[in-house]
């Protein structure tokens, strides 16, 4: 038995497949020439706050910028690779990324930016982000 299927030549169903990946940003994985590196993070939470660990190997601590705005955390860094070629050498393959990387994410609660702290050791940036104390609700009297 054969199956009969209906073909609509004016259907727009195939259009997304034609442009699949065309408008996607060019930053996915590190280690591939021509693509930007990404900052990989782990976020843990307890009652007091959040702990963020971000892998940033080869980055100088002075080139890292962390910003906190309410519950939005932004991490940016500049990765520089010096020219290590000696006379008579040529590059056969280059996979290490050089340039700027950034990452922004929101957390479930507002952060107390006055008490937040950051530490960078062995290529891992650790952020201690305490939650902002909830303010007492105030009842407004209606006149």
Image: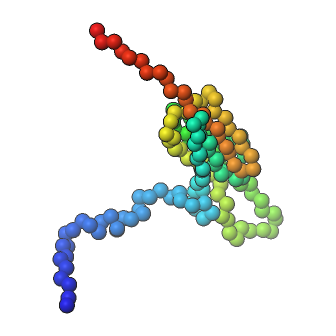
Q: In this picture, is 92 found above or below 50? A: below
Front residue of 100 and 58? 58
**x then y, percent, for residue 76:** 60, 44
Q: Residue at x 62, y 42 (%)?
A: 51
Q: Is residue 67 visible?
A: no
Q: Which of the 4 image quadrants contains residue 30?
A: bottom right
Q: Residue furthest front?
A: 47
**x then y, percent, for residue 55:** 65, 51
Q: Residue at x 63, y 48 (%)?
A: 54
Q: Residue furthest top?
A: 143
Q: Describe the colour scheme in one phrase.
A: rainbow
Q: Residue at x 81, y 65 (%)?
A: 87
Q: Viewed as shown, does residue 110 lie left or right of 118?
A: left
On the rendered image, what quadrant is the C terminus found in?
top left
Q: Viewed as shown, does residue 85 lie left or right of 13?
A: right
Q: In this picture, is 5 found above or below 32? A: below
Q: Is residue 91 visible?
A: yes
Q: In this picture, is 79 found above or below 74? A: below
On the rendered image, what quadrant is the N terminus found in?
bottom left
Q: Viewed as shown, does residue 142 lie left or right of 10?
A: right
**x then y, percent, for residue 7:** 19, 76
**x then y, percent, for residue 78:** 65, 47
């Amino acid at each position: 038995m054969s199956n009969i299927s209906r073909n609509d030549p004016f259907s727009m169903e195939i259009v997304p497949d034609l442009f699949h990946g065309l408008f996607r940003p060019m930053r996915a994985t590190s280690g591939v020439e021509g693509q930007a590196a990404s900052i990989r993070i782990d976020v843990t939470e307890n009652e007091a706050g959040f702990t963020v660990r971000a892998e940033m190997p080869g980055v100088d601590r002075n080139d890292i910028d962390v910003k906190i705005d309410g519950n939005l955390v932004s991490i940016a860094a500049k990765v520089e690779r010096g020219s290590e070629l000696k006379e008579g050498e040529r590059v056969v393959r280059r996979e290490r990324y050089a340039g700027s990387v950034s990452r922004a994410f929101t957390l479930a609660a507002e952060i107390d930016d006055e008490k937040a702290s950051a530490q960078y050791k062995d290529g891992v940036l650790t952020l201690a982000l305490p939650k902002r104390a909830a303010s007492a609700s105030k009842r407004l009297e209606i006149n």
